[in-house]
Amino acid sequence: MKSIAKNSIHWTYSVAIFCALFAIQQQKATAATLSNGWNYAIDSFNDGVTGPQIGGGEFEFYGIAIKETSDTAFIAINSNLSLAGYADPLAQRGNINYGDLFFNFSGQNFNTANASGSLFGIRFAAGNDSGVATTGVYRDVTAKNVTQTNSGFSNLNQFNTVVASQGGTPSMGDLAATDPYFQQTGNSTILNSIATGTKVGEINFLTPATLSVLGLNFAQFNAVGSQTIGFSFNKSSMPSGNYIANFFAECANDAIAIKGSFEKGSAEPVPEPATIFGTLVGLSFLGIGAATRKIKRKIS
């Protein structure tokens, strides 16, 4: 009887531990890009087009990450393109820069949200071809195409075909390269710059050192572009809820999208899966020991 009771206790706790660990592994699998409070989207490392070079050139985008506190959102971009842009005599201004960063909370595809002016946008590159006057956060945004004045691709299908034909792997971070969220064909259909919008907030640029203190670490994904660009803004400038955010180069020589969610009043960092795992295992074994001692005392 003593042995049966003891084995029963061990079995009960073993099942509980298994179920808990299985749940954690499921969480880890579905939130694999969440690390130290940052939500990452990592792009293909060989789909940036810089002249005849595919991958690793000036237009290679490696990743984007977003973190939030109760009142602030932090954005970080890792790439090889600096905010000064890329000199190109074939571009209308002689320089190609980042397009603008768009947030879509509507649940609709990009073109549908654009047609109703329900996009939000952030101009973070002061030297680009944006239709709004200054850097900052904008609402009621519509988007426009600027690839044709920046020696760029006419549509996404053309970009994907060129990259794949040269052995690259086209992708868009959290979206597949051919995801119907974006229009894939047509003439000048890549909408990569703000056309119109109402300014509702400012952005504050952050140094790589500040981003590091905030826990940013692109290197853990082997995303080691030469540039890390960061800025923050007040979350009151945007609604809460699920979004898809994206940006293109002005020539559409690379692009990246990220899926995420803003929560009003969200202040606590999400624990690392590894931390939860260690804590749970420790507590579980402590629980087994305590239960075993208790049953021994009760039986004896």
Image: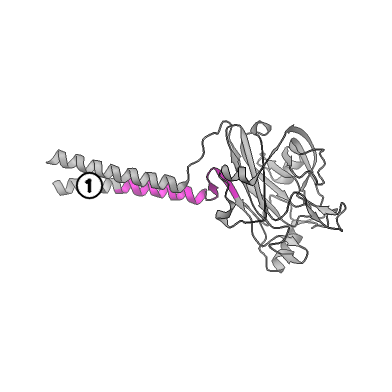
Image location of residue 189, percent across then percent down: 79, 52
Nearer to us in this view, 213 or 149: 213
Image height check: is 13 above or below 150? above
Residue 117 visible from this viewpoint? no
Image location of residue 87, percent across then percent down: 82, 56
Q: Residue at the front extreme?
A: 209
Image height check: is 207 above or below 42? above
Q: Residue at the bottom extreme?
A: 166
Amino acid identity at mark 1:
Ser
For the C terminus, which image quadrant? top left
Q: Which residues are magenta?
A: 14-40
Is 101 situated left or right of 284 in this image? Answer: right
Image location of residue 252, percent across then percent down: 76, 55
**Residue sitting at x 71%, y 60%:** 48
Q: Quadrant of residue 54?
A: bottom right
Nearer to us in this view, 62 or 27: 62
Task: Tell me the chief SS of the magenta region.
Answer: helix
Image height check: is 255 above or below 287? below
Would you name the residue on which mark 1 appears? Answer: 8
SS for callout 1: helix
Image height check: is 190 above or below 170? above
The number of numbered discs placed on residues in the rendered structure image is 1
Is 237 situated left or right of 153 in this image? Answer: left
Task: Indicate yes or no whether the magenta region holds residue 228.
Answer: no
Image location of residue 271, percent across then percent down: 47, 42
Q: Quadrant of residue 61?
A: bottom right
Q: Residues within 10 Å of mark 1 (few under 14, many from 20)?
A: few
